Amino acid sequence: MADLLRRCSKQDTELLIFSDAGAARGNLSLERAHATAAFLNILKRHVSSVAWLNPMPPHRWWGTTAELTAHQVSMFETTGRGFMAMINHLRGQS
């Protein structure tokens, strides 16, 4: 990870994460949420923006680790509208 982050440019690197963040199983794991938040804090120091594309619909995020993660990073649903919002976010237009 350190080697990868050294190659990132704070000005020129946008990062997209594609994951359900725990929403598919409907779980809430505080341990996972804390580890994800720590990971995102590290990433944000090395890239210009981060977006999270979640394949589960937003109503499935509620009460799961995904809901907590969505407070840490811009999370988007996997729909046409979600894709456009994510692209605009990564372009710095959100």
Image (tube, helix red, strand yellow):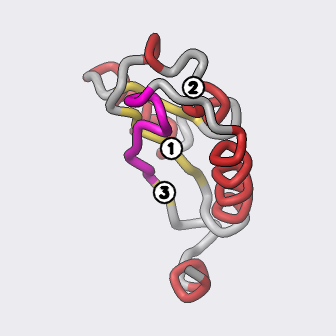
Q: Which residue is mark 1?
A: 51
Q: Which residue is mark 3?
A: 15
Residue type at numbered disc 1: Ala
| Residue located farthest toward the top when viewing the structure as drawn | 59
31 and 69: which one is in front?
31
Asked if 7 appears above or below 39 in the picture, the reply is below
**Residue 44: image location, x then y, percent:** 68, 58
Mark pair 1, 3: CA separation: 6 Å
Numbered-mark total: 3
Mark pair 2, 1: CA separation: 18 Å
Q: Which residue is mark 2?
A: 64
Q: Residue at x 51, y 65 (%)?
A: 13
Which of the two labelled residues, at mark 2 and mark 1, occupies the earlier sequence position? 1
**Crowdedness near tag 3: few (<14), some (14–19) or many (≥20) residues, C-alpha within 10 Å:** some
Residue type at numbered disc 2: Thr
Look at the numbered discs 1 and 3 and tell me whether their residues touch, using CB distance below 8 Å.
yes
Residue type at numbered disc 3: Leu
**Residue 75: image location, x then y, percent:** 52, 32
Q: Main secondary structure of the magenta part?
A: loop
Specify the segment rendered in magenta: 16-25
Task: Kindly state the secondary structure of the residue where label 3 is placed.
Answer: strand
